[in-house]
Image (cartoon, rainbow, N blue to C red):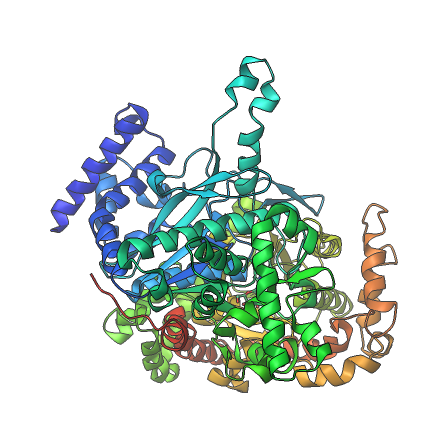
Amino acid sequence: MSKKKLKDFFKQSISSHIKANSGQDVSQATEAEVWAALSRAIIEHVADNWAETKKAYDKTRQEHYLSAEFLVGRSTLNNLVNLDIYDEAKDALKDLGFDLTSILEEENDAALGNGGLGRLAACFMDSSATLDMPVTGYGILYRHGLFKQVFDNGYQVETPDVWMEDDFAPVVPHRDEKQRIELATGDVYAVPYDLPITGYHTDNVNTLRLWKAEPLTPFDIHDFNAGNFQEALEEKNQAEDIWRVLYPNDTTHEGKVLRLKQQYFFASASVKDIIRRHKENHGDLRTFAEFNSLQLNDTHPVIAIPELIRLFMEEGIEFDEASEIAKATFAYTNHTVLAEALEKWDINIVKELIPNVYSVIEKIDAKFRAELAEIDAHPGKIEYMSMIHDGQVHMAWLASYVSYSINGVAQLHTDILRKDTLHDWEDIYPGKINNKTNGVTPRRWLRNTNPELSALITKLLGNEDWVKHADKLEELLPFADDKKVLKQFLDVKKIKKQQLADMVETSLGIKVDVDAQFDIMIKRLHEYKRQLLDAFYILDLYYRIKENPQEDWTPRVFFFGAKAASGYVRAKTIIKFINEIAELINNDSDVNNIIKVVFVENYNVSKAEVLFPAADLSEQISMAGKEASGTGNMKFMMNGALTIGTLDGANVEINGQVGDENMFLFGAKEEEIVEILPSYDPKVPYEKTPGLKRVVDTLIDGTFSDDNQGLFQDLYNSLMVGDWDQADQYYVLGDFASYREAKDRAAVEFNDKETWARKAWINISKSGVFSSDRTIREYVEDIWKIEETKI
Ligand code: T68
């Protein structure tokens, strides 16, 4: 279509969608209505290709990505850029009297995920579409996504995320493809809502299928007529509960019945949908594993395994054959080695909610035990590895047995799975565990959130090919010695810092100096991630500046963005502590022209898009061995920030790319931690490390107030009281000295702008390997065995 025709199409389509939706002329429409109409126009624009893509995929082997979370964020800008229709849409809106940039601000984030795991799934969708791979995502359309965070006197308060009211324009329902889901508490329908997933500069349009629950009947007419209004709506309410809200827990497991209901609901609906499509396209269920593979994003969808076997048995296939098909169908991704995150369900919960599925799990368990007995495994080992033991169903063990592939998400993480978490499985099924280092989409995280840097890259490389072939970023490396280019990079960085500064001033009323070093830590709040280490450093720096105001301090702004799980009291205390520090520093005129602390409220994908490009220093400071991979570390690197980090997760691989000289490594290594912890006494660094005692003591000496709730005392105790496996489990005090040295060094080095820019540039040039396109290619080659299917 010519540019003129496209523009006319958008004008016409937007106008008529507004008329159809509101009965009004476009000139009367609100910006929110225009955004919704634009979304519908995009769907109209891709509709034919979308249908054709589905048809093409149905003829071939397909991958189905099952995930309880897809942290998509906003879609519209991404779609406009991918489809190469940004300018036309902009011009069309201009003619209609609207500004595209402010229209795009109307879109609510689809916050259908907690953090890294959910965002990874969204990046994978983008890469699969861009690479024309037959991959479909399956998840839940949560009515309320991750809670909205507000600060009240520095405390986190959660409020519901109202993101879709009754309708969300970019998704399309397919009522004709609804599925009936069998639950002991009463059956419900699962109705699919499809989000089109566009790829960058390709015609293929993939699908993210999100399920919503509906009652079989809207209300009970007999109860209603009898005046029992509550009872009349009972079934409806039960169904609504299922998709009402995303559980805000990231790395801990919560054994709530409703959570299992959600998992079974979407797993069953997805498996039924996939079986239906397979039967329609290939007839014979026995060829299922030839045409289908299902990737389980962590253990949340693992209940799909017994469900698939159960459904096959209903179709007359014997258990043994059905389980062999399952073994050739499922692959499992593990995202954590934290013991508290491994999902286990009480047998009674599973039995009561889904008895028919439970009896299949029992069969799988018996088969597994028999197979191990056959190879003379030790009875104790058989008991430990079995998916049913100690009164619980162990979802990770179930997944590990049945899946034909188990993967970790960074090399170090996979090594730990092999030697620790899953070492018994590694012994018995050598080769099953493999590594797939995470990646992030360079479309969203570089091209779209940093158009300024992208323009510079495109100018230097001569074209935009790097957006699809991120390995080409390596061709930027020679410019690391080009002073003119480094100057241009610094100019871009300043623009991005100004944009963040503006956002912070508007939303929080805090003014920051864009020439200061922007030091940013954004991720979920968890003790193992060690926001506390950063907080102690800042407080120590504050005291040092107070003592030596004349010294040549580098101006710095310390940014945080983090949500704590609502029930995770200690994490919430850390938020309060950081906010107290921010209050102290930002209001002290002795220091607030040198350092400031900004805790960005309600950190989400849209805010991340402003924060990543503005960073000078990227905080990746988890205790070694705990962070499976991290993906924020990659987004910072792509946007030219230097990492300060431990050798943990994918930091190890970032280090492999850029070398020690282009990042700030500190802290104990994973193999050292294992040695240190058994005899670790936090009182030793507490007493010995200069400055440390003073800042730790602020938790109990009245410097800060937690309104006499004892929260800071508890935090203090968590660091200082108890045996080695209790006191300072995450080695905050132990790593403090080394962190302080590294961060002081980063501050000094920042003053040499050109050397800093050179290092940042090397980081950008070396970031191509962290594109999720690379990750998806590896899944495709090693696990999925699917082929590019271009329409
Ligand atoms: C993260 N995990 C890892 N979990 O912590 C991170 N958990 O290192 C890794 O980079 C990322 O996964 C992608 O692989 C999570 O984000 C969760 O969000 C989660 C959600 C529900 C239950 C348990």
Q: 114 left or right of 658? A: right
Residue 725 placement (x, y as % from top left) = 81, 72
Identify which residue, 318 or 354, lies in the foreground. 318
Q: How many labels does the image show?
A: 0
The image quadrant in which ligand 1 is located? bottom right
Residue 31 placement (x, y as % from top left) = 36, 35
Residue 713 placement (x, y as % from top left) = 85, 57
Name the residue at 52% across, 61% down: 117
Q: 6 left or right of 224? A: left
Identify which residue, 309 or 543, lies in the foreground. 309
Residue 354 placement (x, y as % from top left) = 59, 49
User: Can residue 665 be seen in the rendering of this structure?
Assistant: no
- Looking at the rendering, which quadrant does residue 770 occupy? bottom left
Q: 208 left or right of 383? A: left
User: Can residue 97 be seen in the rendering of this structure?
Assistant: yes
Identify which residue, 635 or 769, lies in the foreground. 769
Name the residue at 52% across, 69% down: 402
Name the residue at 31% across, 77% down: 472
- Looking at the rendering, which quadrant does residue 622 occupy? bottom right
- Looking at the rendering, which quadrant does residue 397 occupy? bottom right
| Position of the C terminus by quadrant | bottom left
